[in-house]
Image (spheres, rainbow, N blue to C red):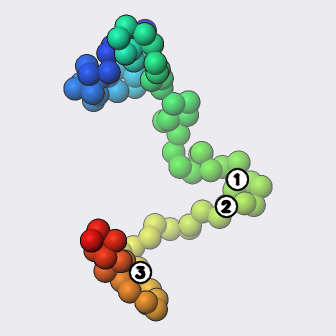
Amino acid sequence: MISAGVKEVKNKLSQFLARVKGGEEVVITERGKPIARIVREQGADKSIRTALGPLVRKGMVVLPGRGVLKEDLRPIEVPGKSVSAMVAEDRR
C-alpha cells in the first residue's frame, strides 16, 4: 500500500494509476490523515462482450452483429435550436 498527499497525487496521477493497474493500493492523505483510497477496479480487463454477457443471456441487451461503420451514421434532424446555439446562449 502506498500513501501520498493530495498535492503529490495531483502532480503524479498517471504514475499512481499505473501502480494501481499493477495491483497496488494508494491511500490519499490530507495533512497526514487518510481521506480516500484508489484501488484497481474488479473486472477491469474484461471485454465489453464479456461484461455484458449476463444481460445478453437475460435478454436485456442485444449486441450488434457487426461493428458500426462511420458511413452508416446519419445526423438526425430535430426541431428547435442547435445544441451549439443553446450552449453559446447559456454561456452568455
Say whether residue 66 is left or right of residue 26: right
Instruction: Pick the residue in front: 17 or 83.
Output: 83
Q: Earlier in the sequence, mark 3 or mark 2?
A: 2
Mark 1 residue element: helix
- Where residue 38 sits, quadrant-wise, is top left
Say whether residue 12 is left or right of residue 40: left
Mark 3 residue element: helix
Write the residue at 31% across / 76% down. Answer: 89
Q: Residue furthest left?
A: 11
Q: Residue furthest right?
A: 58
Q: Are marks 2 and 1 in contact (CB under 8 Å)?
A: yes
Write the residue at 32% across / 15% down. Answer: 5
Please state the horizontal and vertical placement of residue 13, each as a whole percent of the image. 29, 28
Disc sitting over residue 61 in the figure: 2
Q: Decide: is 25 above or below 11.
A: above
Q: Amino acid at mark 3?
A: Asp
Q: Earlier in the sequence, mark 2 or mark 1?
A: 1
**Is the residue marked by circle 2 packed among few (<14), some (14-19), or many (20+) residues within 10 Å?**
few
Q: Decide: is 10 above or below 92.
A: above
Q: Amino acid at mark 2?
A: Val
**Is the residue marked by circle 3 packed among few (<14), some (14-19), or many (20+) residues within 10 Å?**
few
Q: Amino acid at mark 1?
A: Leu
**Is the residue marked by circle 1 packed among few (<14), some (14-19), or many (20+) residues within 10 Å?**
few
Disc sitting over residue 55 in the figure: 1
Disc sitting over residue 72 in the figure: 3
Write the residue at 50% across / 35% down. Answer: 44
